[in-house]
Amino acid sequence: MTTSIVRAICPHDCPDTCALLVTVKDGVAVEVRGDPDHPTTAGVLCTKVSRYTERTYHKDRLLYPMKRIGKKGEGKFARISWDEALDTIAMRLKEIAARAPQAILPYSYCGTMGLVQGESMAMRFFHKLNASLLERTICATAGGAGYKYTIGARIGTDVEQFQDARLILIWGGNPIASNLHFWMRAQEAKRRGAKLIAIDPYRSLTAEKCHQHIAPMPGTDSALALGMMHVLIAENLIDEDYVARHTLGFEQLRERVREWTPQRTAAACGITAQEIEHLAREYGTAAARGEPVAIRLNYGVQRTHGGGMAVRNIACLPALVGAWRHPAGGIQLSTSDAFAKNSQLLQRPDLLTEQPRTINMVQIGDALLRNASPEFGPKIDALVVYNSNPVAVAPESPKVAQGFAREDLFTVVLEHFQTDTADYADILLPATTQLEHVDIHTTYGHMYMMANNPAIVPLGESKPNTEIFRLLAARMGFDDPCFQESDEQIAAQAFNTNDPRTADFEWETLKRKGWQKVNMPDAPFANGGFPTPSGKCEFYSERMKADGLDPLPAYVPPHESLASSPELGKDYPLAMISPPARNFLNSTFVNVESLRNTEGEPHLDMHPADAAQRGIEDGARVRIFNARGSFVAKARVTEKARQGLVVGLSIWWKKFASDGKNANEVTSQRLTDIGNGPTFYDVLVQVEKV
Ligand SMILES: Nc1nc2c(c(=O)[nH]1)N[C@H]1C(S)=C(S)[C@@H](COP(=O)(O)OP(=O)(O)OC[C@H]3O[C@@H](n4cnc5c(=O)[nH]c(N)nc54)[C@H](O)[C@@H]3O)O[C@H]1N2
Ligand SMILES: Nc1nc2c(c(=O)[nH]1)N[C@H]1C(S)=C(S)[C@@H](COP(=O)(O)OP(=O)(O)OC[C@H]3O[C@@H](n4cnc5c(=O)[nH]c(N)nc54)[C@H](O)[C@@H]3O)O[C@H]1N2
Ligand SMILES: [Mo]
């Protein structure tokens, strides 16, 4: 018997990007543990990934290429050979490309965050084809863009500093579920005497464990930040020296926030004026005492109309009170820009010989249903889906499903499992998991680059995404040398050694060790140096003005709320959000029995007053609906949901729900104010007992 330990990396779309140790016995992965030596993983994994072998060796793993033999969406397939699968795909794509390459659309997101399996060979392939470009905005672009206008880049407080903060605002995030290794640091801070405040419309697992919970209505965070700035400035709780040296536009900001009295802010947010005053005072006075005050700003605030502006406004707070002076002060939204990655080499956009149109992935439902027109261009004739499950995760799902069901659409899906999306494939291809392929990762929650070594040989006939596109490229006759590069060669090019942050990086060393921290200062903006055009934190932004936006922090109300759309509110008076369930990772892991059993079945949390008004008792089956669609869930009557709000933890596979539907039946394809992001949490619904 031979036993070995292989260094691997969790591939999932999560800020923690953990370092893994995989125990392999006689070629079989028997255990996945967190690396105790990696500073942020610290030997701890979430429940999901500690069950990784259960997922990899799941009886339902796709092991062979298959072709559809039933109706679209029915999920009936027959096994075929790789040659038949690849020949069929190449033939169809060639024929479409000869007519209109833009009629081909890739659809992918972060099923794996790996730079090799995520964004290398596949991107090269579609660039070479001149296929339509996909705007990959389904998650974080609203906040990313709002943050960049203010701070300059997605850089902020290092997660490894948070245990030293004295006050932490956990704003629009549920880290117990979705950022566990940050939560461990916040817990340590709490033990050392820090105060934790959650700002979340829902009493999440995290909000429950904080000292205080403030529950504004969804989509009102931009107002809350304006109200806080009003109090901070009115009560002179600002760091005048930091503001004078390192910020731009303070006088205009002062004018702008004058009208955002606690009373006005309270009315916009649906909370009390005292809550706003206390929050601002607590934040401002702790900073004035010289204590590190930190904000962990997450994705919850970004999924409504004003999501971009909300992040921008909140990102102004640390500069106003001088919180950046401390390594443990400031704000973390994302660490994505700490990495100098070689996107040009990985993705080869230079292979494009035309400038194709761009299709926003959030609006895939509408896009699939559009006919050819001068402004849209050709109808979408072929769709190649990998690393994503759009039929479950994209908004306004009735339209997405209708689009995928088109008889004249040729659909290829690369997957581990027969997901809701796979059910619509014409050709379904088996992909390898992280235990079976090479990869290299950056992350959005810490500062380490990470290398993944394969632990086992591919199961069945599964192949890495890269290999599938390599084989397709050969059949298409693409002879550029980049289509022959091995996964290791690609990984070795992923980081830029001309950049001081990764100058001493080496693939061979990274592979052996598993992880290496980028070279970045501990308190990135202690002395200013913001990567904005002015070099300052921009309260006033010329770039926003040039982009047709309000150059100053403003309130952008939700598309759908009782205040902003009263007519709609008459029929659909409840706001709905559908944040991640703890035991799922977006729609990944929903088919792992032990995890699904822990979640039970789709639930809808609603406040006792809202339930009573509708004659709904705890445990009743309810229908959640609006003009876009409806789905069924089991009501949980609980004060965790504030009045006026219902919460359906997500993202369920439709096929595991009693009615074959999930929360995205009612979500909308409308976009955010900045960054073309989704508005999953900007939805009005009605609920009735079934
Ligand atoms: N277990 C698990 N972990 C995950 C994921 C998962 O699906 N499951 N998904 C991963 C991905 S892709 C992402 S993007 C991240 C997301 O990371 P987080 O943003 O931390 O995600 P959530 O856990 O959904 O936390 C969002 C919180 O925001 C609240 N919220 C909703 N609307 C608003 C609002 O308008 N304002 C405020 N202040 N709060 C609001 C919700 O009630 C919820 O508690 O997590 C990643 N990690
Ligand atoms: N209602 C609602 N909808 C949401 C959200 C919400 O909070 N509420 N959150 C949104 C957010 S933040 C995000 S990021 C998106 C996420 O949406 P997606 O990125 O689509 O994420 P997943 O649902 O996890 O689907 C990823 C799929 O990729 C597959 N996969 C993993 N690794 C590989 C690989 O190496 N090769 C191949 N071929 N496939 C692989 C997995 O098996 C899985 O089925 O969903 C969004 N949708
Ligand atoms: Mo996401």
Image: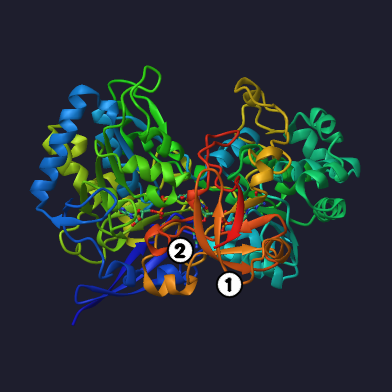
- Which quadrant would the N terminus be assigned to in this image? bottom left
- What amino acid type is highlighted by mark number 2? Phe
Chain-order first, disc 1 or disc 2:
2
Residue 177 quadrant? bottom right
Query: What number is the disc on residue 464?
Result: none
The percent coordinates of residue 243 (x first, y second) are 78, 37
**Residue plotted at (58% across, 72% down):** 619
Nearer-the-camera pick, 386 or 525: 386
Identify the residue at horizontal 33%, vertical 29% (top origin): 132
Q: Is residue 66 above or below residue 493?
A: below
Badge 1 marks a residue whose secondary structure is loop
Q: Is mark 2 within 8 Å of ligand 1?
A: yes
Which residue is pictured at 44% across the width and 54% down the height? Answer: 13
The residue that mark 1 highlights is 619
Q: Residue 315's quadrant in the figure?
A: top right
User: In terms of depth relative to the viewer, which is nearer, 627 or 311?
Assistant: 627
Where residue 574 appears, as percent x and y from the top left, is 66, 52
| Residue placed most toward the observer, 587 or 494 | 587
Whether residue 143 appears in this view of the structure is yes
Q: Secondary structure at mark 2?
A: loop
Q: What whole-number distance in Å separates the C-alpha atoms at marks 1 and 2?
A: 22 Å
Crowding at dot 2, Cα within 10 Å, few <14 / some 14-19 / many 20+, comes out as many
- Where residue 100 sits: x, y (%)? 24, 23
Residue for badge 2: 584
